[in-house]
């Protein structure tokens, strides 16, 4: 009895230590995001003086006003949205179909294909050959330059293949075939409805990746009308800081510098908000799909 009580007390201490540790970890992770939110609506002087540690000070929305008055923001939103939708559809289609095919034991050359795909994780052509390839295909400075070069992510493909391998039993396929089901019918009528967790995982990974795509736009897109939101926010931020640095009048320079500080925090919120809204809707599928797709692999 005494031993049971001591073990129980040790368990309680362990639980308390876990709760304290994860609370501290949660604060460490969340506070930077919280600080960016309150800094984006606080007076820049108060932010620089460290007066906005917990609550916003002298609330103002001038930073957001400056951001949303710029017509390029709306163009960037539209471009990023189109890149995200088209890129996610392409990635989902290729990753799910390829992952399912590679999970089938009756696929001839399955191990060879998998080895060649994994090989690309460690050895790649590099920036210049990739750029020359995109240019040679004639898709540079277009939508396809944003979505086609990274259309298949090997990491996501491995997770999808592992999910299908352990979640779709061979006996289910055999039973379906006995009932007259074809490969396509089995895939669309049975595999897809049973694979919502992995579809949510690949979809969320792809959507976040396409929304945050910055480097491909910097390399492949010359036309400013095609720039995604990330590139336009960068241009606005650089432009605001450059204007403040070029002004000789100290008062005007201070005003521009204050505006640049508010814009800096505001653009982080504007760029992150769509993904923060999307994540709660797929979170339950996300955890389930990642666990099945990765742990059993």
Image (spheres, rainbow, N blue to C red):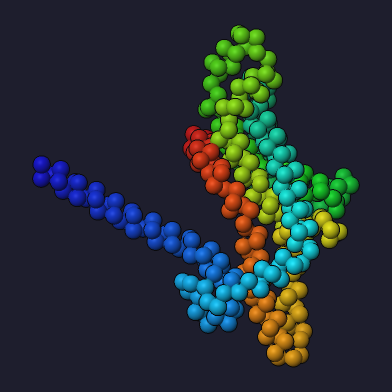
Figure check: 45 above or below 294: below
Q: How many numbered marks have been drawn onto this rendered protein structure?
A: 0
Give how far across and how far down residue 5 sits, in percent.
15, 46
The quadrant holding residue 64 is bottom right
Q: Is residue 27 left or right of residue 236?
A: left
- Quadrant of image for the N terminus: top left
Figure check: 101 above or below 89: above
Give how far across and how far down residue 165 sits, in percent.
56, 27
Q: Is residue 91 visible?
A: yes
The quadrant holding residue 173 is top right
Q: Is residue 247 left or right of residue 132?
A: left
For this rendering, which residue is in front, 282 or 182? 282
Q: Residue at the location (50% across, 79% down)?
A: 50
Q: Is residue 33 left or right of residue 270?
A: left
Q: Residue at the location (55% across, 78% down)?
A: 58
Q: Is residue 234 visible?
A: no
Q: Is residue 4 left or right of residue 192?
A: left
For this rendering, which residue is in front, 28 or 38? 38
Q: Residue at the location (66% across, 73% down)?
A: 62
For this rendering, which residue is in front, 155 or 280? 280
Give how far across and how far down residue 179 sits, in percent.
61, 9
The quadrant holding residue 215 is bottom right
Q: Residue at the location (38% across, 58% down)?
A: 23
């Amino acid at each position: 009895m005494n031993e049971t009580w001591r073990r129980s007390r040790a368990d309680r201490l362990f639980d308390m230590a876990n709760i304290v540790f994860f609370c501290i970890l949660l604060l460490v992770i969340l506070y930077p995001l919280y600080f960016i939110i309150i800094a984006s609506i606080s007076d820049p002087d108060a932010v620089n003086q460290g007066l906005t540690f917990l609550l916003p000070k002298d609330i103002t929305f001038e930073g957001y006003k400056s951001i949303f008055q710029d017509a390029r923001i709306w163009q960037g939103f539209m471009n990023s949205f189109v890149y995200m939708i088209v890129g996610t559809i392409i990635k989902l289609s290729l990753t799910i179909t390829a992952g399912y095919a590679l999970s089938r034991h009756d696929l001839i050359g399955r191990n060879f294909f998998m080895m060649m795909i994994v090989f690309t994780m460690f050895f790649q052509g590099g920036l210049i050959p990739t750029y020359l390839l995109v240019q040679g295909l004639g898709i540079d400075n277009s939508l396809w330059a944003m979505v086609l070069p990274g259309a298949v992510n090997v990491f996501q493909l491995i997770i999808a293949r592992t999910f299908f391998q352990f979640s779709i039993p061979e006996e289910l396929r055999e039973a379906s075939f006995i009932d007259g089901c074809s490969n396509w019918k089995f895939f669309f009528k049975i595999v897809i409805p049973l694979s919502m967790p992995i579809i949510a995982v690949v979809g969320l990974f792809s959507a976040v990746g396409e929304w945050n795509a910055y480097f491909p736009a910097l390399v492949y897109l010359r036309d400013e009308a095609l720039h995604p939101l990330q590139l336009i926010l960068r241009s606005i931020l650089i432009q605001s800081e450059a204007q403040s640095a070029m002004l000789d009048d100290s008062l005007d320079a201070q005003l521009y510098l204050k505006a640049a500080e508010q814009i800096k925090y505001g653009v982080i919120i504007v760029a992150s908000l769509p993904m923060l809204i999307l994540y709660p809707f797929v979170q339950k599928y996300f955890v389930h799909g990642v666990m099945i797709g990765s742990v059993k692999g």
